[in-house]
Image (spheres, rainbow, N blue to C red):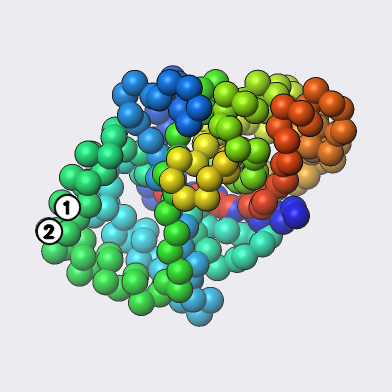
Amino acid sequence: MCLLMVLKFFQENYSHFYFNEVVCSSFATGPRQNDGMFYEFRTYALKPSKVNEFLENFKKNVHLRTAHSELVGYWSVEFGGRINKVFHIWKYDNFAHRTAVRKALAKDKEWQEQFLIPNLALIDKQESEITYLVPWCKLEKPPKEGVYELATFQMKPGGPALWGDAFKRAINAHVDRGYTRLVGVFHTEYGTLNRVHVLWWNESADSRAAGSLLGPLRLWLSTSQADKVSALGPIKVVVLEFAINIYT
């Protein structure tokens, strides 16, 4: 199954869109990360009539939440798959750090009254995944305004030690075409297992469409060559999302 969801990138009045470069190390199968750093993907399905209200509240009060931990990005789905949805990525040093942040938020009355409580009434569903960057990537900062594509893959069990090299070659071949830029490749540790999220930056939705008509990644996913299939096992694109980032 392949669904295309486009995430619009809202360029508003924010100047703290951080993409710190992080050297990745292995996880899941093989040695764990030495520093324990991970990224939490949080996805909210919003009530259709309340999307604008939610986004306005976010833009007005996000500083209350980012005072506690680093926000990588906050995206609103523009088209493809389920719309009226936002997802955001939070960076934590380790699980103790996340626990400390959640405790601090529970005591932050301003955040609860101005951000949390008003927004909870606008949300239908919440999901959380704990992810690590794959061993061979860095989290990169996009060069300028643009749109983002989140491609989600369901992989064969075994982790990057099993499918990492073949997937890396496919990603690099896609990057080499030059029309898109890789932001990060994330592998789930908690949540839906054996899932990989690949976040891309594009200058525009049209430039992405023109460049990917016969992109290497798409051809690679449909190939039946034995070396690639045996390395990955059953693989499918769960969802492709295009979105805009409302945190810049």
Q: Residue at x 38, y 35 (%)?
A: 38
Query: Residue 6, percent across and down?
Result: 65, 54
Q: Is residue 111 left or right of residue 131?
A: left
Q: Is residue 211 left or right of residue 31?
A: right
Q: Please tell me how many numbered marks the rendered image carries.
A: 2
- Quadrant showing the C terminus: top left
Q: Is residue 104 above or below residue 126?
A: above
Q: Which mark is residue 103?
A: 1
Identify which residue, 124 or 119, lies in the foreground.
124
Q: Gap between marks 2 and 1, in whole Å?
A: 7 Å
Q: Residue at x 49, y 76 (%)?
A: 47
Q: Is residue 51 left or right of residue 90?
A: right
Query: Residue 124, percent across and down?
Result: 45, 73
**Badge 1 amino acid:** Lys
- Quadrant showing the N terminus: bottom right
Q: Are marks 2 and 1 in contact (CB under 8 Å)?
A: yes
Identify which residue, 204 or 162, lies in the foreground.
162
Mark 1 neighbour density, 10 Å: few (under 14) some (14–19) many (20 or more): few
Q: Which mark is residue 107?
A: 2
Query: Residue 147, percent across and down?
Result: 60, 46
Q: Residue at x 23, y 39 (%)?
A: 97
Identify which residue, 222 or 229, lies in the foreground.
229
